[in-house]
Amino acid sequence: MSLLENIKNLQKVNTLSKHEQLVHGIIASIDNKTLIVGDKLPSINVMVSDLGYARKTIVKAYEELKDRGLVESKKLKGYFIVSNETNVTLKIALVLFSFQRFQEEFYNAFRKELGDKFQIDVFFHHNNVSVFKSIFNTIKGKYGKYVIAPIPNPTLRPVIESISPDKLLIIDRFIALNNEYSYISQEFEKSTYSKLAELLPKISKYKKFILFFEEHIDHPVGILNAFEKFCAKHNLNGSVEKRYQQNSVEKSSLYFFISDTFLWEVLRDAKHNKYTIGKDVGILSHNDHVVKEIVFGGITTISSDFKEMAVKAANHIKFKKEIQQIVPSHLIRRNSL
């Protein structure tokens, strides 16, 4: 049965709109192998002529098939079948910093909440502007939804805003965009400062308070600002270090980690020196996960709930509702202070 025959058969179904007749007719043609990967769809002008449907109806149907990842448009050449996975409702590009533990937690919850009818392709930009732009050039126009953890760099705003608001969701880091765009983001400066203030009695018992911060990777500058303001206000002996030097752990020092790169090294060295975590040496960490509940009697963390963020992101996609929300940070007290 030809493509046009598949579509015309669906014209007899009164509950289907013309747009739906087109979409289901093309899907049926893929399923029965009338259309295979690489085949070119009839041009919009040809479909208008053969079916008598409005041009915008044809365009809407072809765009939905693009969103599902079944069709791809090539400039000046037309629309082509690129997949036979007709059970996919929507094809999603998920662009993250890197596959760290908490981002893996986000992905797993996001995947579970969406279910099998959504295809998720994952990309990592590693806080590199050139890599970010390269990813965008590769994926633009090929997905129905873009879920992006951006680099907070104002030069990237035009790149990101080249995606229409209905197809873009910003997660994790906040970046100022046109107010039509949806986001589910963290806030770092005020939330970090308020959690440090709650911990002041614990922090004050240490002679040194050391933050590990590296500007060239994905460390939020808001955490650095909060740390410096907090130490200045309370006359604390605070310092910022880029890296941890092996075997340099000191008694009566509190170490604050944004990522886990040096966390395990400090814990190892503390153990070798027979220092008690929470008494001789203090540990504070951003971004909670299950390992931090367990090791050394538990690590105190300041963290957003990444599973909650993932569920909100999935529901935004499933129910097509705009969202603009800053997710709260939580102080999880354990025995490391």
Image (cartoon, rainbow, N blue to C red):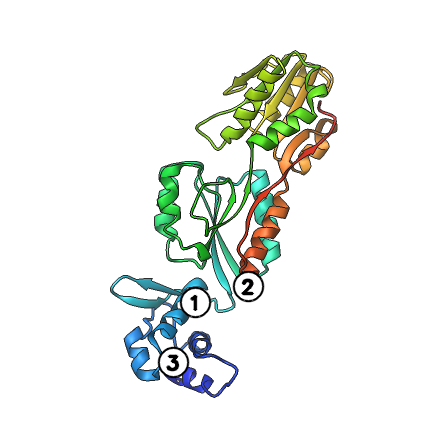
What's the residue type where badge 1 is placed? Glu
Residues at marks 2 and 3, CA–CA distance in whole angstroms: 24 Å
Q: In this view, does 227 lie above or below 10?
A: above
Q: Position of residue 228 (x, y in %)?
A: 55, 20
Residue identifier under label 1: 64
Q: What element does badge 2 sit on? A: loop
Residue 8 lies left or right of residue 245; in this view the side is left
Rendered location of residue 154, percent (x, y):
39, 38
Q: Which residue is located at x 63 percent, y 16 percent? A: 234
Q: Which of marks 2 and 3 is nearer the N terminus?
A: 3
Residue at x 37% of width, y 83% of height: 4
Where's residue 240, x and y in %? 53, 18
Q: Mark 3 = which residue?
A: 3
Q: Quadrant of the C terminus?
A: top right
Crowding at label 2, few (<14), some or many (≥20) Cα neighbours within 10 Å? Answer: some
Question: Which quadrant of the structure image shows residue 19?
Answer: bottom left
Q: In the image, which disc is placed on residue 117?
A: 2
Q: Where is residue 237 in the image (x, y as percent from the top left)?
A: 60, 12
The amino acid at mark 2 is Lys
Proximity of marks 1 and 2: CB atoms separated by less than 8 Å: no
Say which quarter of the image contains residue 58. bottom left
Mark closer to the chain start, 1 or 2: 1
> Could you tell me which residue is drawn at 40 percent across and 70 percent down?
60
Neighbourhood count class around disc 1 (C-alpha, 10 Å): few under 14, some 14–19, many 20 upward: some
